[in-house]
Image: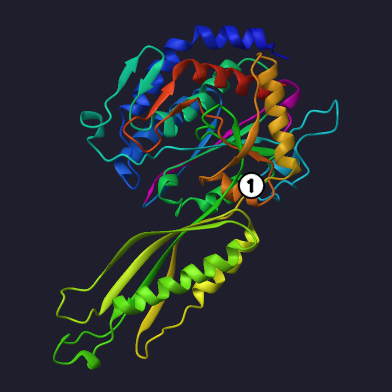
């Protein structure tokens, strides 16, 4: 087994290459739904992962190119367990590792994304690439191109050393709710021992174990236009109807919140044409957050059954994106403990706690696969012009992952 000292030495010797690769990824701007940019970054990543022994599958969609990568185990991990093959069932929640003294032959799934929230031109505008001592800035450097570099480099450090099998999924549409990659994610989960997400950690470096569910809903109302003074009774105000529906939504959320916290944000609202015309169209987009699956199901079911207050009005409810609540359990805590042991081998204290934000690990954790997230480096400013990482913590996370994969 490779020692933590050997891993540390290899990571330190490769710091220049890590930095240059990170720079190369950040300078390649990859907004969600930018297909050609997605092809470019996945061609680059595919070549890098093939060089560390990975078999790369590319899945192109209208949102971009997703990658599914298999890296076989080596040494005592070189035999692939039957349950790790595609088509096998998702790992049971209790199956975090093999029995004491036995090698777990199933792959560990590493989860990342290649898209960012930033539009083309951001590098020349609000968020240029910049290095100030240990602080590195740039669009996507924190969320989450540094996390992808962490996965790659840990495998490179272990390329000629014993390590467990690894499966990697890098999607192209995480920042817009993963509309085209969820089925691929479900396939990636088949037969894995657990999953690690490489989103940013809590500000103090703690892992994210459990995430709120996140659902975006559009409520669209169709009424009937009429002159607001001459024929007001012939009209059906879509705006007035929408306002009443939003009051109903507040009541639904308040009722659910008596048992557990439910958050509802009216993010956008639009409708109508002018003050002297009864509005024929109006809509609102809501952002909902849930701690648990029961409140999530209750609220979303109630929203689907909204009915018009006004005769002749039409109310339509559409779920735009949905990430289920991930309520952490014992298996997630056990995987977090394993990561903490890897950190302890390097003299780093690691803990885990729930997070308010949502990501691809919501689906993974909600399905009972042992999961932790937040394995990316420390930093801040996700989705903001202050986006940055603290570079030494990227090297630290690489070491910790390499220790975990080799134990």
- 68 within the magenta span: yes
Q: What colouring method underlies this structural image? A: rainbow
Left or right, 363 with reference to 22: right
Percent x, y for residue 339?
A: 67, 27
Residue at which label 1 appears: 365
Indicate the position of residue 227 as horizontal and vertical percent values.
Answer: 15, 87
Q: What kind of element bears circle 1?
A: helix
Instruction: Tell me: 345 left or right of 103.
Output: left
Residue 179's place in the image compared with 354, above or below, is below
Q: Quadrant of residue 218?
A: bottom left
Q: Is residue 163 visible?
A: no
**Residue lying at 50% horizontally and 33% vertically, measured from the top left:** 200
Residue range highlighted in magenta? 63-80
User: Front-most of 377 and 93?
Assistant: 377
Q: Is residue 262 above or below residue 25?
A: below
Q: Is residue 273 above or below residue 81?
A: below
The quarter of the picture where residue 385 lies is: top left
**Looking at the image, how many numbered discs can be counted on the residues?**
1
Residue reaching furthest right?
A: 100
Q: As rendered, which of 118 and 276 lies closer to the eye?
A: 276
**Dividing the image into 4 quarters, which one contains the C terminus?**
top right
Q: Judge the density around disc 1: few (<14), some (14-19), many (≥20) Cα neighbours within 10 Å.
A: many
Q: Does residue 69 belong to the magenta stretch?
A: yes
């Amino acid at each position: 087994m490779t020692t933590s000292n050997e891993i540390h030495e290899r990571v330190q010797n490769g710091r220049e290459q890590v930095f240059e690769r990170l720079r190369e990824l950040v300078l390649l701007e990859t907004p969600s739904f930018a297909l050609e940019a997605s092809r470019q970054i996945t061609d680059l990543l595919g070549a890098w992962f093939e060089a560390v022994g990975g078999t790369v599958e590319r899945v192109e969609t209208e949102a971009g190119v997703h990658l599914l990568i298999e890296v076989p185990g080596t040494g005592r991990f070189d035999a692939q367990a039957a349950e790790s093959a595609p088509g096998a069932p998702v790992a049971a929640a209790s199956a975090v590792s093999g029995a004491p003294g036995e090698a777990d032959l199933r792959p560990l799934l590493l989860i990342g994304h290649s898209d960012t929230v930033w539009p083309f031109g951001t590098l020349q505008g609000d968020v240029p690439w910049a290095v100030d001592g240990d602080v590195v800035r740039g669009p996507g450097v924190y969320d989450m191109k540094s996390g992808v570099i962490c996965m790659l480099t840990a495998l490179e450090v272990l390329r000629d050393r014993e390590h467990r099998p690894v499966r990697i999924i890098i999607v192209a549409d995480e920042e817009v709710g993963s509309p085209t990659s969820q089925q691929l994610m479900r396939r990636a989960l088949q037969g894995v021992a657990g999953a690690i997400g490489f989103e940013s950690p809590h500000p103090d470096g703690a892992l994210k174990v459990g995430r709120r569910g996140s659902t975006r809903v559009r409520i669209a109302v169709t009424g009937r236009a009429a002159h607001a003074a001459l024929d007001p009774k012939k009209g059906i105000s879509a705006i007035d109807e929408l306002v009443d529906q939003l009051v109903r939504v507040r009541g639904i959320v308040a009722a659910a919140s008596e048992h557990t916290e439910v958050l509802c944000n009216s993010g956008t609202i639009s409708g109508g044409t002018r003050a002297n015309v009864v509005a024929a169209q109006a809509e609102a987009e809501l952002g909902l957050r849930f701690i648990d699956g029961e409140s999530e199901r209750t609220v979303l079911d109630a929203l689907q059954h909204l009915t018009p207050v006004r005769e002749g009005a039409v109310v339509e409810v559409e779920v735009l994106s949905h990430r289920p609540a991930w309520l952490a359990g014992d298996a997630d805590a056990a995987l977090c403990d394993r990561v903490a042991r890897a950190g302890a081998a390097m003299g780093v204290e690691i803990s885990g706690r729930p997070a308010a934000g949502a990501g691809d690990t919501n689906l993974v954790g909600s399905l009972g696969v042992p999961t932790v997230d937040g394995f990316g480096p420390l930093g801040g400013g996700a989705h903001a012009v202050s986006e940055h990482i603290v570079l030494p913590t990227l090297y630290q996370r690489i070491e910790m992952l390499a220790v975990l994969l080799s134990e």
